[in-house]
Image (spheres, helix red, strand yellow):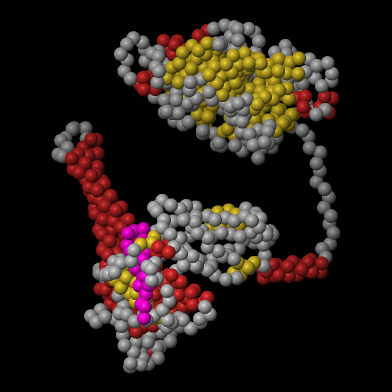
């Protein structure tokens, strides 16, 4: 922070929510008062033009309102890009040029003396204007071509065309060669040159005479074509490489003998002579925002005002820092003005519209350090206050938790939503009503779903809401209105819910036969599927004993209900796609019978377990993982070969005595094409692996559900089984599902599912196994999963405690197919 601050002489805040940039500020005697006192002209991107005549508030006039200091305020139709004061009409009067995206307007500002104490009245009169055919970026003015008595205007368009205007007439237009993005533009009167910084990060100089006689082009393409007729191609007079983008470009008028070109870069400050030779360069240790060169009292030097994003205004004499002052805001434009009461005032403008007139200097400080009250400390009072604060903290800690009233309920009408075509957006309300003993403020809602589903926006910031406001994000849950109270401690409330099945499937006609079939039994009389799945009538058969859905992937699943027994069969050509339908069927039965007051509902599965189908999904996933490792090895091998060929070619090219390449270039090209083909194949295999893991996860969920129905597992035991068979949410390059699942299943077989206490004690005493890695095949994993199902079928219990299983009844039979 600077030791000195810029002394505020006059300031004003312009508008509310307006934006300003470096071209929006200029100073000059725009009203031609004759006294030579400057006025401040400000234009904004909102199209508001303001003219000020500042004076100090310490004078007698300052006791009144600041309204008399604003001479004029006019609302224009379009944003104001740049304002300039100059002799734009053939007279000695100064006029105001206003550049807008598609228009250049020249105005005269005049004042009429008032007859009362309220002062003069100022008017803005349009002298002439030009409608531009191209969108303007910036402009510069001056006596182009050595003209006397008036100034011409040069406008740079966004597509790189320099358009020249001489008062009311349009002179000509030229495209800059190699143009990409517009840069700052300035005019040097002594050499009659135009200077700009191109997208190639170099300073370019063009003579006005060269621009005038260059070949005219109607478009950018015409300017790049070869010359077929007379004329000259436009080329710069000289160029200097800067190596960085330029923020601003300025040519101060110091003397008639020479001119200096000052360029403000992103990290450096440059000063060149008018022939392109560099005078000096200053490396900046901060991010600059604006600058202004002006004449120095010392011969052969330049003074510069430089503002930065640290709210600092620095004064340099060439490369020597002479002064530093703190400003109230970050300046984007700076000018030096002479007012009636003070000369050399610093005028700065920020991007938010803070206009400030200040001067550099110091004011004496009359602050003195107050005497410290050296009273004795009352330790008893401090101890009582500490106990009071600790009690408040304990009470706040106990009362700041949030207890949900009930878990999220599955929507009962999510199935019967009808048919949804691809591209349609389904909005489903899934409610969660937590019971809170405190109110919330600054709430954020984060939504997480598992692949292949996705959300368009996963995080929402909730503003204070009334009772009638609801937020219904895509695939999300609405948040009902809540009162807010700031407690200063962040808390998290998590609610897990199931999305409706209609999100991924549509109604279809039932299939009479299928490859995979699973039967679920209940202990209650058969019910009509129309009552269990209320919704569209075309989803069911006329008798209500069957329904079918088709997933967006194309797989069709059919549910058939027996007319005489309490059995329900789910069949499909895709094994893994039956998981969601069976899960929905079990949940709908529980919801249906719970509404009727039935509490002893039981589901069962009589087998056999579909282990062959499940193992086929495991093998498909494993083969894709093996292919991924093979692709990685091949890519590494080809990359080593590619680098070796590059080194040999580089050695040949560096050799002073040329030698034949011996087809190394052809080998390099072939290796490169092999690398690209392997990379494409590896990416395609990665996508297939992600899809295979989703199918594997669905198949595992189905196997867990069937095991829980088969053995009547409790929810805790089901969670243990699910955590064992699904230890990973996704595969990683270093750890996959096969080795993780094998390790988890092996642990269960050695602990709670062990045959005897002796085996269990041996497994506990066994040291840690080898590091997990991709196995050679899936034989060991399939054997362990089959053994897990066999021991569960013989009465094994799943528990996190290290307890040995009780003796198994002899009459319990396994439902695993023979030979597995």
- Give, as a single range, the part of the protein colored magenta: 545-564
Q: Is residue 629 above or below residue 723?
A: above
Q: Residue at x 60, y 7 (%)?
A: 90
Choose between 117 and 372: the one closer to the eye: 117
Using the rendered view, name the quadrant where residue 222 is placed.
Answer: top left
| Residue 562 forms part of the magenta stretch | yes
Q: How many marks?
A: 0
Relative image position of residue 114 (x, y in whole percent): 80, 16
Relative image position of residue 522 (x, y in whole percent): 41, 80
Choose between 87 and 439: the one closer to the eye: 439
Q: Is residue 260 above or below residue 242?
A: above
**Camera sees residue 522:** yes
Secondary structure mostly seen in magenta is strand
**Camera sees residue 251:** no
- Residue extending furthest front? 542
Choose between 478 and 60: the one closer to the eye: 478
Relative image position of residue 618 (x, y in whole percent): 29, 68
Q: Is residue 323 above or below residue 719?
A: above
């Amino acid at each position: 922070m600077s030791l000195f601050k810029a002394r505020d002489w006059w300031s004003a805040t312009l508008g509310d929510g307006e934006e300003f940039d470096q071209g929006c500020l200029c100073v000059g005697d725009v009203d031609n008062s004759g006294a030579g006192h400057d006025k401040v002209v400000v234009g904004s991107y909102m199209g508001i033009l303001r003219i000020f005549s500042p004076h100090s508030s310490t004078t007698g006039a300052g006791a009144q309102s600041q309204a008399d200091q604003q001479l004029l305020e006019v609302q224009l139709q379009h944003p104001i890009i740049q304002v300039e004061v100059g002799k734009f009409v053939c007279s000695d009067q100064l006029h105001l040029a206003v550049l807008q995206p598609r228009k250049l307007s020249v105005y005269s500002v005049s004042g009429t003396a008032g007859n009362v104490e309220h002062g003069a009245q100022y008017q803005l009169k349009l002298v002439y204007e030009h409608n531009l055919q191209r969108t303007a970026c910036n402009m510069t003015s001056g006596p182009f071509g050595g003209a006397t008595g008036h100034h011409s205007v040069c406008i740079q368009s966004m597509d790189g065309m320099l358009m020249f205007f001489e008062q009311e007439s349009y002179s000509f237009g030229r495209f800059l060669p190699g143009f990409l993005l517009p840069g700052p533009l300035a005019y040097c009167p002594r050499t009659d040159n135009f200077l700009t910084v191109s997208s190639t990060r170099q300073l370019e100089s063009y003579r006005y005479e060269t621009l005038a006689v260059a070949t005219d082009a109607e478009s950018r393409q015409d300017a790049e074509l070869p010359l077929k007729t007379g004329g000259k191609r436009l080329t710069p007079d000289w160029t200097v490489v800067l190596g960085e983008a330029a923020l601003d470009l300025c040519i101060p008028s110091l003397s008639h003998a020479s001119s200096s070109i000052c360029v403000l870069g992103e990290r450096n400050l440059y000063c060149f002579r008018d022939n392109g030779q560099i005078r000096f360069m200053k490396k900046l240790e901060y991010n600059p925002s604006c600058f202004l060169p002006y004449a120095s009292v010392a011969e052969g030097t330049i003074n510069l005002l430089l503002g930065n994003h640290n709210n600092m205004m620095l004064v340099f004499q060439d490369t020597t820092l002479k002064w530093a002052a703190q400003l109230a805001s970050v300046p984007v434009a700076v000018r030096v003005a002479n007012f009636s009461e003070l000369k050399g005032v610093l005028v700065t403008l920020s991007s938010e519209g803070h206009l400030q007139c200040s001067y550099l200097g110091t004011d004496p400080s009359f602050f003195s350090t107050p005497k410290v009250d050296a009273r004795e400390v009352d330790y008893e009072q401090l101890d009582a206050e500490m106990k009071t604060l600790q009690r408040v903290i304990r009470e706040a800690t106990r009362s700041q938790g949030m207890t949900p009233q009930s878990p999220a309920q599955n929507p009962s009408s999510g199935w019967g939503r009808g048919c949804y075509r691809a591209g349609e957006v389904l909005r489903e309300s899934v409610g969660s009503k937590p019971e809170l003993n405190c109110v919330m403020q600054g709430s954020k809602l984060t939504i997480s779903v598992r692949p292949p589903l996705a959300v368009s926006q996963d995080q929402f910031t909730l503003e204070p809401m009334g009772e009638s406001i609801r937020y219904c994000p895509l695939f999300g849950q609405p948040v009902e209105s809540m009162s807010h109270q700031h407690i200063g401690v962040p808390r998290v409330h998590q609610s897990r819910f199931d999305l409706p099945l209609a999100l991924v499937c549509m109604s279809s006609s039932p299939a009479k036969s299928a490859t995979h079939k699973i039967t679920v039994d209940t202990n209650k009389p058969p019910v009509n599927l129309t009552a269990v799945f209320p919704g569209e009538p075309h989803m069911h058969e006329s008798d209500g004993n069957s329904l079918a859905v088709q997933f967006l992937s194309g797989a069709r699943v059919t549910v058939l209900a027996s007319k005489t027994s309490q059995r329900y069969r789910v069949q499909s050509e895709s094994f893994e796609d039956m998981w969601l339908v069976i899960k929905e069927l079990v949940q709908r039965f529980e919801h249906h019978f719970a509404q009727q007051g039935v509490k002893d509902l039981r589901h069962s599965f009589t087998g056999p377990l579909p282990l062959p189908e499940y193992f086929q999904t495991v093998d498909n996933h494993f083969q894709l993982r093996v292919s991924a490792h093979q692709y990685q090895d091949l890519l590494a091998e080809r990359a080593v070969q590619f680098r070796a060929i590059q080194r040999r070619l580089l050695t040949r090219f560096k050799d002073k005595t040329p030698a034949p390449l011996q087809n190394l270039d052809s080998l390099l090209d072939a290796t490169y094409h092999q690398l690209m083909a392997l990379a494409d194949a590896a990416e395609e295999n990665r996508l297939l692996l992600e899809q295979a893991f989703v199918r594997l996860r669905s198949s595992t969920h189905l196997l867990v559900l069937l095991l829980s129905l088969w053995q009547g597992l409790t929810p805790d035991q089901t969670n243990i089984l699910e955590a064992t068979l699904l230890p990973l949410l996704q595969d990683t390059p270093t750890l996959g599902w096969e080795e993780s699942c094998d390790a988890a299943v092996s642990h269960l077989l050695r602990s709670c599912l062990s045959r005897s206490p002796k085996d269990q004690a041996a497994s506990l005493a066994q040291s840690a196994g080898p590091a997990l890695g991709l196995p050679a095949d899936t034989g060991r994993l399939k054997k362990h999963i089959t053994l897990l199902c066999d021991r569960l079928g013989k009465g094994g219990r799943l528990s996190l405690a290290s307890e040995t299983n009780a003796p198994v009844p002899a009459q319990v039979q396994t439902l695993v197919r023979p030979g597995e």
